[in-house]
Amino acid sequence: MSELTDAAAALRRVDRVESAAWKGSNWYLRFLLIYGLAQLVIAPALVLLRHPVSTFVAVGVNTVVVVALSFYAARQRTVRRGFGMRHAMVIAGWGVTFALTASLGSTAFHENVLFAVAATVACVLPFALGARSEIRRSA
Amino acid sequence: MTGKDTGSHPRHELAPLLTSPVRLSVVAALAPLDKAEFSFVRDLVEVSDSALSKQVAALEEAGWVAVEKGRVERRPRTWLILTAEGRTVYRRHLNALRAISGT
């Protein structure tokens, strides 16, 4: 076998293995989708339900989801490159929107349906953007 | 002919340690990841535990792969990480392969 075909075969193998490693490490997309879906309950609960039911529901759902996703993440066999920074950005973005939702939703905009819709979209957005980024990187 | 293995041909940029298909596959498996568990790489490269251990030891000795041991739920886990030096060598190796194959 010539040097040229050896090199071409090695490159094909490398592509195949890299691609399989990438595909086998797509668990973070599921993580983002589940946490994003949880916001559809958490954010409206904070704004529309009466205190302290709103807090119990929002904190309860959030705690269950975080614990479940932490177990899920801890069992994974791979961590994609740049995961730490990407995850920190998603959680920081969500932290800001969640804090605003909790503070404004329990005071000035309490039981305001329009605010509840806007807050839900804002709370889902960091996870949606994170998921879009993961999908783009996989394309 | 001098017998010295230096010159302008791209083959001189190849890393001898990565001319082994298994070692190259191990590094390729780690390249898109921050870290991967030993069993993940083993399954991907389709080698036995002992064969992978041997290849990883060679890569670790070269400073291209780091090995981290830990526990999750009392289960021991071994993580493999491609070092910065390993990435640089891998990239150079791939560039040399591309130059040789003309792609």
Image (spheres, coloured by chain):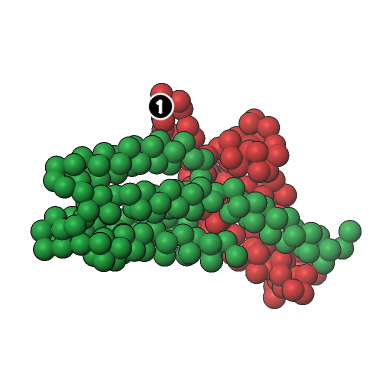
Chain colours: A green, B red
Front residue of B29/A38: it is A38
Q: Secondary structure at mark 1?
A: loop
Left or right of A127 on screen, residue B90 = right
Q: What's the residue at 78%, 64% (across, down)?
A: A8
Residue A84, located in which quarter of the rendered image? bottom left
Q: What's the residue at 63%, 31% (across, down)?
A: B49
In the depicted structure, whether residue B78 falls above or below residue A90 = above
Q: Position of residue A72 (x, y in %)?
A: 44, 38
In the depicted structure, whether residue A114 falls above or below residue B55 = below
- Using the image, name the chain to which the residue with label 1 belongs: B
Front residue of B85/A64: it is A64
Q: What's the residue at 41%, 24% (across, down)?
A: B74
Q: Which residue is mark 1?
A: B73
- As shown in the figure, which amino acid type bears the numbered disc 1? Glu
Front residue of B18/B74: it is B74
Left or right of A106 on screen, residue B51 = right
For residue A99, say whether it is visible: no
Left or right of B53 on screen, residue A9 = right
In which quadrant is the N terminus of chain A drawn?
Answer: bottom right
Q: Position of residue A126 (x, y in %)?
A: 36, 62
Q: Position of residue A98 (x, y in %)?
A: 24, 57
Front residue of A123/A112: it is A112
In which quadrant is the C terminus of chain A drawn?
Answer: bottom right
Task: Count residues near mark 1 (Cα–Cα under 10 Å), then give few for <14, some for 14-19, many for 20+.
Answer: few
Q: Tag count in the figure?
A: 1
Q: Position of residue A31 (x, y in %)?
A: 44, 48
Q: What's the residue at 31%, 60% (across, down)?
A: A120
